[in-house]
Amino acid sequence: MLYADYNSTSPVLPEVLEAMLPYLTEEFGNPANERTSLGKKAKEAVELARKKVADLVNALPEEVVFVSGGTESCFSAILGSFAGRSERRQFICSAVEHSAVLEAFSFLSSLDSKTEILRIPVDRNSKLDLEKLKTSVSENTNLVSVMMANNETGVLFPIKEIAKIAHSKNVLLHTDAVQAVGKIKIDFKDLGVDLLSLSGHKLGAPKGVGALVIKKELIEKNFWKPPMVGGGQEEGRRGGTLAVAQIVALGCAAEIKKKELSQGSAEKLQALRDEFEKLLLEKVSGVTINCSENMRLPNTSNFLVEDVIGLELMEELSKQNIFVSTGSACSTGKLEPSHVLSALGLDTVSNLSSIRVSLGSKTTIEEVRRLAKRISSVVSGLRDSSEMEFEKLFNSKG
Ligand code: PLP
Protein backbone atom coordinates (compact mmCIF):
# COMPACT_ATOMS: atom_id res chain seq x y z
CA MET A 1 0.00 0.00 0.00
CA LEU A 2 1.10 3.52 -0.78
CA TYR A 3 -0.72 5.97 1.46
CA ALA A 4 -0.58 9.63 0.41
CA ASP A 5 -3.76 10.95 2.02
CA TYR A 6 -2.54 12.04 5.46
CA ASN A 7 -4.69 15.21 5.39
CA SER A 8 -7.71 12.95 5.33
CA THR A 9 -6.61 10.82 8.24
CA SER A 10 -3.51 9.07 9.56
CA PRO A 11 -2.83 5.62 10.98
CA VAL A 12 -2.54 5.31 14.76
CA LEU A 13 1.16 5.31 15.62
CA PRO A 14 2.35 2.05 17.29
CA GLU A 15 3.61 3.90 20.41
CA VAL A 16 0.26 5.66 20.65
CA LEU A 17 -1.68 2.40 20.51
CA GLU A 18 0.55 0.93 23.19
CA ALA A 19 0.07 3.98 25.43
CA MET A 20 -3.73 3.98 25.17
CA LEU A 21 -4.45 0.25 25.50
CA PRO A 22 -4.19 -0.01 29.32
CA TYR A 23 -6.87 2.68 29.62
CA LEU A 24 -9.29 0.51 27.66
CA THR A 25 -8.58 -2.51 29.83
CA GLU A 26 -7.35 -2.57 33.43
CA GLU A 27 -7.10 1.22 33.93
CA PHE A 28 -10.71 1.91 33.01
CA GLY A 29 -11.46 4.39 35.79
CA ASN A 30 -13.53 7.54 35.49
CA PRO A 31 -11.33 10.60 36.10
CA ALA A 32 -14.27 12.28 37.82
CA ASN A 33 -13.92 9.73 40.67
CA GLU A 34 -10.62 11.21 41.74
CA ARG A 35 -10.98 10.01 45.32
CA THR A 36 -10.68 6.37 44.31
CA SER A 37 -7.32 4.97 43.26
CA LEU A 38 -8.74 3.83 39.90
CA GLY A 39 -10.24 7.25 39.15
CA LYS A 40 -7.10 9.01 40.37
CA LYS A 41 -4.92 7.11 37.90
CA ALA A 42 -7.25 8.01 35.04
CA LYS A 43 -7.24 11.65 36.15
CA GLU A 44 -3.43 11.71 36.30
CA ALA A 45 -3.20 10.21 32.82
CA VAL A 46 -5.58 12.86 31.46
CA GLU A 47 -3.62 15.69 33.10
CA LEU A 48 -0.34 14.39 31.70
CA ALA A 49 -1.90 14.25 28.23
CA ARG A 50 -3.20 17.80 28.70
CA LYS A 51 0.32 19.00 29.41
CA LYS A 52 1.69 17.24 26.31
CA VAL A 53 -0.98 18.74 24.04
CA ALA A 54 -0.37 22.19 25.55
CA ASP A 55 3.38 21.78 24.99
CA LEU A 56 2.92 20.96 21.32
CA VAL A 57 1.25 24.33 20.65
CA ASN A 58 2.87 26.35 23.45
CA ALA A 59 -0.31 26.92 25.44
CA LEU A 60 -0.98 26.48 29.16
CA PRO A 61 -2.32 23.06 30.21
CA GLU A 62 -5.36 24.75 31.77
CA GLU A 63 -6.16 26.28 28.37
CA VAL A 64 -6.66 22.83 26.78
CA VAL A 65 -10.19 21.39 26.72
CA PHE A 66 -10.61 17.85 25.39
CA VAL A 67 -13.42 17.29 22.89
CA SER A 68 -14.46 14.63 20.38
CA GLY A 69 -12.49 15.99 17.41
CA GLY A 70 -11.95 18.90 15.04
CA THR A 71 -15.61 19.37 14.16
CA GLU A 72 -16.74 19.66 17.77
CA SER A 73 -13.81 21.91 18.55
CA CYS A 74 -14.73 24.40 15.79
CA PHE A 75 -18.42 24.22 16.72
CA SER A 76 -17.65 24.89 20.36
CA ALA A 77 -15.34 27.82 19.51
CA ILE A 78 -18.01 29.48 17.38
CA LEU A 79 -21.13 28.76 19.41
CA GLY A 80 -19.27 29.50 22.65
CA SER A 81 -18.19 32.93 21.38
CA PHE A 82 -21.75 33.67 20.38
CA ALA A 83 -22.97 32.62 23.84
CA GLY A 84 -20.30 34.79 25.49
CA ARG A 85 -21.05 38.04 23.68
CA SER A 86 -24.37 37.60 21.92
CA GLU A 87 -24.76 41.37 21.53
CA ARG A 88 -22.00 41.21 18.86
CA ARG A 89 -23.78 39.70 15.91
CA GLN A 90 -21.30 39.75 13.04
CA PHE A 91 -19.00 36.78 12.37
CA ILE A 92 -16.26 36.71 9.76
CA CYS A 93 -14.45 33.79 8.15
CA SER A 94 -12.49 33.04 5.00
CA ALA A 95 -14.22 31.65 1.92
CA VAL A 96 -12.14 28.47 2.10
CA GLU A 97 -12.93 27.24 5.62
CA HIS A 98 -13.69 23.56 6.24
CA SER A 99 -17.36 22.61 6.52
CA ALA A 100 -16.81 22.20 10.29
CA VAL A 101 -16.60 26.01 10.46
CA LEU A 102 -18.98 26.91 7.63
CA GLU A 103 -21.75 24.66 8.91
CA ALA A 104 -21.35 25.91 12.49
CA PHE A 105 -21.96 29.42 11.15
CA SER A 106 -24.98 28.22 9.15
CA PHE A 107 -26.37 26.69 12.32
CA LEU A 108 -25.77 29.93 14.18
CA SER A 109 -27.66 31.89 11.49
CA SER A 110 -30.57 29.49 11.79
CA LEU A 111 -30.72 30.17 15.54
CA ASP A 112 -30.60 33.92 15.24
CA SER A 113 -31.72 35.63 12.03
CA LYS A 114 -29.97 38.87 13.05
CA THR A 115 -26.59 37.16 12.84
CA GLU A 116 -24.47 38.20 9.87
CA ILE A 117 -21.82 35.85 8.48
CA LEU A 118 -19.27 37.49 6.21
CA ARG A 119 -16.93 35.40 4.06
CA ILE A 120 -13.71 37.13 3.05
CA PRO A 121 -12.58 36.18 -0.46
CA VAL A 122 -9.20 34.77 -1.49
CA ASP A 123 -7.31 35.18 -4.76
CA ARG A 124 -6.09 32.48 -7.17
CA ASN A 125 -3.22 31.61 -4.82
CA SER A 126 -5.54 31.61 -1.81
CA LYS A 127 -4.20 34.89 -0.40
CA LEU A 128 -6.83 36.32 1.92
CA ASP A 129 -8.06 39.84 1.19
CA LEU A 130 -6.69 41.44 4.36
CA GLU A 131 -7.84 44.91 3.33
CA LYS A 132 -11.41 43.65 3.19
CA LEU A 133 -10.93 42.04 6.59
CA LYS A 134 -9.61 45.31 8.05
CA THR A 135 -12.54 47.34 6.77
CA SER A 136 -15.06 44.69 7.84
CA VAL A 137 -14.19 44.18 11.52
CA SER A 138 -16.11 46.51 13.79
CA GLU A 139 -17.46 46.84 17.33
CA ASN A 140 -20.32 44.62 16.13
CA THR A 141 -17.98 41.77 15.16
CA ASN A 142 -17.89 38.89 17.61
CA LEU A 143 -15.37 36.50 16.10
CA VAL A 144 -13.06 36.06 13.12
CA SER A 145 -12.44 32.42 12.18
CA VAL A 146 -9.60 31.76 9.74
CA MET A 147 -7.96 28.39 9.36
CA MET A 148 -4.24 28.02 9.96
CA ALA A 149 -3.81 25.74 6.96
CA ASN A 150 -6.26 24.70 4.30
CA ASN A 151 -6.99 20.98 4.13
CA GLU A 152 -7.17 20.85 0.32
CA THR A 153 -4.49 23.23 -0.90
CA GLY A 154 -2.29 23.28 2.20
CA VAL A 155 -2.15 27.09 2.04
CA LEU A 156 -1.04 28.73 5.29
CA PHE A 157 -2.80 31.89 6.44
CA PRO A 158 -1.08 34.85 8.18
CA ILE A 159 -2.65 34.18 11.56
CA LYS A 160 -0.51 36.59 13.58
CA GLU A 161 -1.43 39.48 11.31
CA ILE A 162 -5.10 38.46 11.34
CA ALA A 163 -5.04 38.34 15.16
CA LYS A 164 -3.80 41.95 15.24
CA ILE A 165 -6.58 43.06 12.90
CA ALA A 166 -9.23 41.28 14.98
CA HIS A 167 -7.89 42.56 18.29
CA SER A 168 -7.83 46.17 17.05
CA LYS A 169 -11.64 46.06 17.49
CA ASN A 170 -11.65 43.78 20.53
CA VAL A 171 -12.76 40.91 18.29
CA LEU A 172 -11.80 37.29 19.04
CA LEU A 173 -9.83 35.10 16.64
CA HIS A 174 -10.48 31.39 16.26
CA THR A 175 -8.15 29.35 14.09
CA ASP A 176 -9.00 25.89 12.81
CA ALA A 177 -5.51 24.40 13.09
CA VAL A 178 -6.65 20.81 12.49
CA GLN A 179 -4.36 20.45 9.46
CA ALA A 180 -1.44 22.41 10.85
CA VAL A 181 -0.93 20.85 14.28
CA GLY A 182 1.83 18.26 14.17
CA LYS A 183 2.96 19.30 10.68
CA ILE A 184 4.46 22.69 11.50
CA LYS A 185 5.62 24.41 14.70
CA ILE A 186 2.82 26.38 16.33
CA ASP A 187 3.03 28.92 19.13
CA PHE A 188 -0.43 29.69 20.49
CA LYS A 189 0.89 32.44 22.75
CA ASP A 190 3.02 34.17 20.17
CA LEU A 191 0.33 34.05 17.47
CA GLY A 192 -2.09 35.87 19.77
CA VAL A 193 -4.92 33.50 18.88
CA ASP A 194 -7.90 33.29 21.27
CA LEU A 195 -9.25 29.88 20.29
CA LEU A 196 -7.50 27.04 18.44
CA SER A 197 -8.92 23.74 17.19
CA LEU A 198 -6.99 20.51 16.73
CA SER A 199 -7.86 16.89 15.97
CA GLY A 200 -6.16 13.64 17.02
CA HIS A 201 -6.58 11.56 13.88
CA LYS A 202 -4.54 13.98 11.80
CA LEU A 203 -1.47 13.40 13.94
CA GLY A 204 -1.33 9.69 14.68
CA ALA A 205 -3.97 9.39 17.42
CA PRO A 206 -7.32 7.66 16.79
CA LYS A 207 -10.43 9.31 15.40
CA GLY A 208 -12.86 10.77 17.91
CA VAL A 209 -10.61 12.94 20.03
CA GLY A 210 -9.41 16.51 19.72
CA ALA A 211 -9.01 19.68 21.70
CA LEU A 212 -10.14 23.26 21.85
CA VAL A 213 -7.44 25.56 23.21
CA ILE A 214 -9.04 28.56 24.89
CA LYS A 215 -7.01 31.56 26.02
CA LYS A 216 -7.27 31.85 29.80
CA GLU A 217 -8.50 35.45 29.78
CA LEU A 218 -11.50 34.56 27.63
CA ILE A 219 -13.02 32.51 30.39
CA GLU A 220 -12.17 35.13 33.02
CA LYS A 221 -13.89 37.84 30.93
CA ASN A 222 -16.86 35.58 30.07
CA PHE A 223 -16.18 36.16 26.36
CA TRP A 224 -16.70 32.44 25.73
CA LYS A 225 -19.32 30.23 27.37
CA PRO A 226 -19.55 26.44 26.94
CA PRO A 227 -22.16 25.34 24.42
CA MET A 228 -21.82 21.72 25.61
CA VAL A 229 -22.85 21.47 29.25
CA GLY A 230 -23.53 18.46 31.45
CA GLY A 231 -21.67 16.94 34.37
CA GLY A 232 -19.21 19.81 34.83
CA GLN A 233 -16.20 17.99 33.36
CA GLU A 234 -13.27 19.98 31.98
CA GLU A 235 -13.87 22.76 34.55
CA GLY A 236 -17.39 23.11 33.19
CA ARG A 237 -16.11 23.87 29.71
CA ARG A 238 -17.23 20.59 28.10
CA GLY A 239 -19.70 18.20 29.65
CA GLY A 240 -19.34 14.47 29.17
CA THR A 241 -17.29 11.66 30.72
CA LEU A 242 -13.75 11.95 29.43
CA ALA A 243 -12.57 9.47 26.77
CA VAL A 244 -9.46 8.64 28.79
CA ALA A 245 -7.81 6.20 26.36
CA GLN A 246 -8.28 8.53 23.38
CA ILE A 247 -7.00 11.48 25.40
CA VAL A 248 -3.92 9.51 26.48
CA ALA A 249 -3.41 8.67 22.79
CA LEU A 250 -3.68 12.33 21.79
CA GLY A 251 -1.13 13.27 24.45
CA CYS A 252 1.27 10.58 23.27
CA ALA A 253 0.89 11.61 19.60
CA ALA A 254 1.45 15.27 20.56
CA GLU A 255 4.67 14.36 22.36
CA ILE A 256 5.91 12.38 19.34
CA LYS A 257 5.03 15.18 16.89
CA LYS A 258 6.79 17.76 19.05
CA LYS A 259 9.94 15.63 19.02
CA GLU A 260 9.70 14.98 15.27
CA LEU A 261 9.29 18.69 14.56
CA SER A 262 12.36 19.54 16.64
CA GLN A 263 14.26 16.95 14.56
CA GLY A 264 13.27 18.57 11.25
CA SER A 265 10.18 16.56 10.19
CA ALA A 266 8.66 19.59 8.42
CA GLU A 267 11.79 20.19 6.35
CA LYS A 268 12.00 16.50 5.46
CA LEU A 269 8.36 16.45 4.34
CA GLN A 270 8.84 19.57 2.27
CA ALA A 271 11.82 18.06 0.47
CA LEU A 272 9.73 14.98 -0.36
CA ARG A 273 6.78 17.08 -1.51
CA ASP A 274 9.00 19.27 -3.68
CA GLU A 275 10.61 16.20 -5.24
CA PHE A 276 7.15 14.75 -5.94
CA GLU A 277 6.01 17.95 -7.66
CA LYS A 278 9.20 18.14 -9.71
CA LEU A 279 8.80 14.54 -10.92
CA LEU A 280 5.10 15.04 -11.60
CA LEU A 281 5.72 18.10 -13.76
CA GLU A 282 8.45 16.22 -15.64
CA LYS A 283 6.40 13.07 -16.27
CA VAL A 284 2.86 14.32 -16.83
CA SER A 285 1.86 16.97 -19.35
CA GLY A 286 -0.87 19.50 -18.54
CA VAL A 287 -0.25 19.59 -14.80
CA THR A 288 -0.60 22.81 -12.78
CA ILE A 289 0.19 22.92 -9.07
CA ASN A 290 -2.57 24.85 -7.31
CA CYS A 291 -1.43 27.68 -4.99
CA SER A 292 2.25 26.93 -5.54
CA GLU A 293 3.04 30.64 -5.19
CA ASN A 294 1.74 30.81 -1.64
CA MET A 295 3.12 29.47 1.65
CA ARG A 296 1.89 25.92 2.06
CA LEU A 297 1.98 23.06 4.54
CA PRO A 298 5.15 21.07 3.83
CA ASN A 299 3.27 17.82 3.11
CA THR A 300 0.50 18.93 0.77
CA SER A 301 0.31 19.12 -3.00
CA ASN A 302 -2.89 19.98 -4.86
CA PHE A 303 -2.68 19.89 -8.64
CA LEU A 304 -4.89 19.83 -11.67
CA VAL A 305 -4.36 17.37 -14.49
CA GLU A 306 -5.88 18.50 -17.77
CA ASP A 307 -8.35 16.13 -19.46
CA VAL A 308 -8.66 13.88 -16.44
CA ILE A 309 -11.44 13.68 -13.87
CA GLY A 310 -9.82 13.83 -10.44
CA LEU A 311 -12.22 11.32 -8.94
CA GLU A 312 -11.46 8.79 -11.68
CA LEU A 313 -7.75 9.22 -11.15
CA MET A 314 -8.24 8.70 -7.42
CA GLU A 315 -10.33 5.56 -7.99
CA GLU A 316 -7.89 4.07 -10.49
CA LEU A 317 -5.01 4.64 -8.09
CA SER A 318 -6.95 3.05 -5.25
CA LYS A 319 -7.34 -0.12 -7.36
CA GLN A 320 -3.56 -0.30 -7.20
CA ASN A 321 -3.62 0.27 -3.44
CA ILE A 322 -2.47 3.87 -3.77
CA PHE A 323 -4.45 6.41 -1.79
CA VAL A 324 -4.83 10.09 -2.63
CA SER A 325 -7.86 12.36 -2.48
CA THR A 326 -9.98 14.87 -4.36
CA GLY A 327 -11.70 17.82 -2.73
CA SER A 328 -11.93 17.53 1.01
CA ALA A 329 -12.28 14.03 2.41
CA CYS A 330 -15.87 14.75 3.41
CA SER A 331 -16.98 15.47 -0.17
CA THR A 332 -15.06 12.55 -1.67
CA GLY A 333 -17.31 10.29 -3.69
CA LYS A 334 -19.49 13.08 -5.10
CA LEU A 335 -18.81 14.76 -8.41
CA GLU A 336 -19.23 18.21 -6.96
CA PRO A 337 -16.67 20.94 -7.42
CA SER A 338 -14.70 21.74 -4.29
CA HIS A 339 -15.83 25.00 -2.67
CA VAL A 340 -12.19 25.70 -1.84
CA LEU A 341 -11.02 25.54 -5.44
CA SER A 342 -14.12 27.46 -6.61
CA ALA A 343 -13.19 30.24 -4.17
CA LEU A 344 -9.77 30.45 -5.85
CA GLY A 345 -11.57 31.11 -9.13
CA LEU A 346 -10.92 27.74 -10.79
CA ASP A 347 -13.51 26.93 -13.45
CA THR A 348 -15.57 23.75 -13.00
CA VAL A 349 -13.43 21.66 -15.36
CA SER A 350 -10.15 22.59 -13.65
CA ASN A 351 -11.82 22.14 -10.28
CA LEU A 352 -13.01 18.60 -11.05
CA SER A 353 -9.63 17.79 -12.60
CA SER A 354 -7.77 18.54 -9.37
CA ILE A 355 -6.36 16.05 -6.94
CA ARG A 356 -4.61 16.17 -3.56
CA VAL A 357 -1.56 14.28 -2.43
CA SER A 358 -0.66 14.62 1.25
CA LEU A 359 2.44 12.96 2.66
CA GLY A 360 3.18 11.82 6.20
CA SER A 361 5.93 10.87 8.58
CA LYS A 362 6.22 7.36 7.13
CA THR A 363 6.50 8.52 3.49
CA THR A 364 9.81 7.66 1.82
CA ILE A 365 11.61 9.00 -1.24
CA GLU A 366 10.99 5.66 -3.00
CA GLU A 367 7.28 6.04 -2.42
CA VAL A 368 7.30 9.56 -3.78
CA ARG A 369 9.05 8.36 -6.97
CA ARG A 370 6.64 5.44 -7.32
CA LEU A 371 3.68 7.75 -6.79
CA ALA A 372 4.74 10.14 -9.57
CA LYS A 373 5.35 7.20 -11.91
CA ARG A 374 2.01 5.53 -11.18
CA ILE A 375 0.12 8.79 -11.57
CA SER A 376 1.83 9.27 -14.92
CA SER A 377 0.79 5.85 -16.23
CA VAL A 378 -2.77 6.04 -14.87
CA VAL A 379 -3.20 9.52 -16.40
CA SER A 380 -2.07 8.22 -19.81
CA GLY A 381 -4.56 5.35 -19.59
CA LEU A 382 -7.41 7.62 -18.53
CA ARG A 383 -6.66 10.14 -21.24
CA ASP A 384 -6.72 7.41 -23.90
CA SER A 385 -9.91 5.78 -22.68
CA SER A 386 -12.05 8.62 -21.45
CA GLU A 387 -11.53 11.41 -23.92
CA MET A 388 -15.09 11.16 -25.24
CA GLU A 389 -16.59 10.67 -21.82
CA PHE A 390 -14.81 13.72 -20.45
CA GLU A 391 -16.01 15.92 -23.30
CA LYS A 392 -19.56 14.66 -22.86
CA LEU A 393 -19.54 15.16 -19.11
CA PHE A 394 -18.37 18.73 -19.17
CA ASN A 395 -20.39 19.76 -22.20
CA SER A 396 -23.57 18.50 -20.59
CA LYS A 397 -22.67 20.34 -17.37
CA GLY A 398 -21.96 23.51 -19.32
N1 PLP B 1 -11.04 21.28 9.99
C1 PLP B 1 -10.23 20.89 9.00
C2 PLP B 1 -9.36 21.89 8.31
C3 PLP B 1 -10.19 19.53 8.62
O1 PLP B 1 -9.39 19.15 7.63
C4 PLP B 1 -11.03 18.62 9.29
C5 PLP B 1 -11.07 17.20 8.89
O2 PLP B 1 -10.75 16.85 7.78
C6 PLP B 1 -11.84 19.09 10.34
C7 PLP B 1 -11.82 20.42 10.66
C8 PLP B 1 -12.74 18.15 11.11
O3 PLP B 1 -11.99 17.39 12.02
P1 PLP B 1 -12.57 16.00 12.59
O4 PLP B 1 -12.50 15.02 11.46
O5 PLP B 1 -11.65 15.64 13.71
O6 PLP B 1 -13.95 16.25 13.06
Image (cartoon, grey):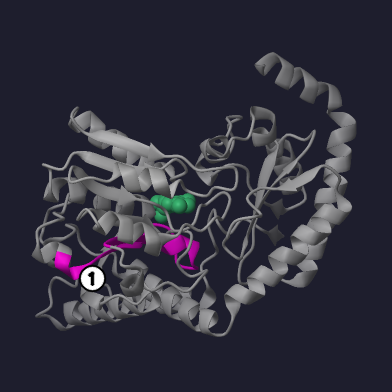
Cβ of mark 1 under 8 A from ligand 1: no
- Res. 291 visible in picture: yes
Q: Please name the amino acid that badge 1 sits on.
A: Glu
> Which percent across, then down, holds residue 303?
70, 47
- From the image, tell me which residue sits under label 1: 63
Q: Is 172 left or right of 25, judged from the image as shown?
A: left
Please state if 74 lies on the left or on the right of 358 as rendered.
Answer: left
Q: Which image quadrant: the C terminus? A: top right
Q: Quadrant of residue 192?
A: bottom left
Range drawn in magenta? 194-217
Tell me if residue 215 is in the magenta stretch.
yes
Task: Please give the name of the residue rendered at 52% of the width and 72% of the height, measured from the top-left corner.
Answer: 13
Answer few, some or many: residues within 10 Å of disc 1's Cα (few below 14, many 20 plus, some between 14 and 19).
many
Secondary structure of residue under mark 1: helix
Give the image location of residue 333, x and y in percent.
59, 35
Picture residue at 33% right of the left edge, 69% below the top: 247
For residue 235, which quarter of the picture?
Answer: bottom left
